[in-house]
Image (spheres, rainbow, N blue to C red):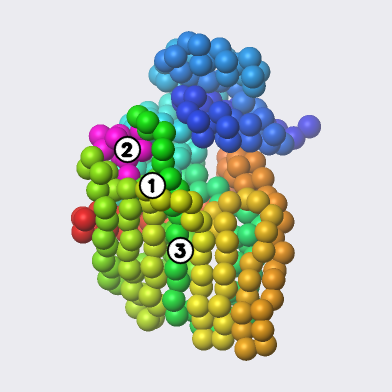
Amino acid sequence: MEKRIKWGVLGYAKIAREQVIPAIVRASNSEFYAIASRDAEKAKQCQEKFGCSKVYKSYDELLDDPEIQAIYIPLPNSLHKEWTIKAAQKGKHILCEKPIALNTEEALEMIKVCEQNNVKLMEAFMYRYTDRTRKVKELLDSGIIGDVKYINSSFRFLLSRENDVRMAPELGGGSLYDVGCYPINFVGMVTGSSPVSMSGECVLQNRVDVLFSAVLKYENGIIAVINSGFNAFTRVFSEIVGTKGVMEIPDTFFGNAGTITITTAEGRKEIEVQESDRYQLEVEDFADAVLNNRQPLFSLEETVRNMKIIDQLLDRR
């Protein structure tokens, strides 16, 4: 029987209960072992629904459990650093929601503590585990659209829920942190480098950006435009323009089936994309990295690159 990593989850946030905990349950090399929640009723609901072995009233109690090997952190952005460091100091491997921290300084401190305690740390960019992302990379590598010159990537939706933590500045709210980090990462994946200059504009509401657009320029002449927002209808779409053609990627960051469209001088071609269980694949990759002492698919180098760009854009608000 395949070895399984025992997971503990800090908090019963929506992303945890709807996506990641079910993914841990489905994963072939993982066991959903423990939940910690200050809300006893929520913890009870979680145990009844997913059948975890242990329920804890505090995060510290969960981290003290020697059975737990890996921690998933779905807490508000402002708490990522504190609980990643505490988990690392207890010898736990950590899968932390994006953005990994509020700034590069925090991220580097988290990475250092994890290295000192010999534990794995990965930022939870689940879209990197989809068939859609794999095919985008394959198509780029094939040279079908030539040399990339322009990238446009958007991730926005209408945030209508009242008292959402994403609208709280003290908790690390804002669209750039929440969804803008995806287009930034996508552009980084395509270019494989950091921009040499950038500029950004945003619309603020209660000290939180509800709309953010930025232009990034790269040393090799590529220009990228990224857009994020909470204040208008959903738009999740990217295009990559090259010297020989254009690639259009609807639902860029989702795991649903669909198509990627390639337009060249020869005409338009639709590339089929298969549905992907992106959260399960993410959990299985991280658990396998722990079991086999290797690096997971998504690197900390990319995490730091992302964070540096976010820092610079927020400084330019």
Q: Earlier in the sequence, mark 3 or mark 1?
A: 3
Q: Going by the image, does 225 lie left or right of 95?
A: left
Task: Check disc 2 and report the residue beneath it.
Answer: 167
* Residue 38 placement, left or right of 297: left
Residue 27 in sight: yes
Residue 129 magenta-highlighted: no
Q: Amino acid at mark 2?
A: Met
Q: Amino acid at mark 3?
A: Ser
Q: 90 or 165, which lies in front? A: 165
User: Measured along the vertical axis of the image, is residue 6 above or below residue 27?
Assistant: above
Image quarter where the C terminus lies is bottom left
For marks 2 and 3, the one nearer the N-term is 3
In three-dimensional space, the C-alpha distance between marks 3 and 1, rounded to whole angstroms, equals 15 Å
**Is 295 in front, or is 310?**
310
User: How many numbered badges does the structure rendering display?
Assistant: 3
Q: Which mark is residue 230?
A: 1
Q: Is residue 130 left or right of residue 220?
A: right
Q: Residue at x 39, y 54 (%)?
A: 228
Q: Position of residue 229 (x, y in %)?
A: 38, 51
Where is mark 3, residue-wise?
153
- The x and y percentages for residue 31 are 65, 27
Residue range (magenta):
165-174
Answer whether residue 172 is magenta in the image.
yes
Where on the picture, by quarter, is residue 193?
A: bottom left
Tell me, yes or no, whether the two marked residues, 1 and 2, touch with CB atoms within 8 Å. Answer: yes
Circle 1: residue type? Phe
**Secondary-structure class at tag 2:** helix
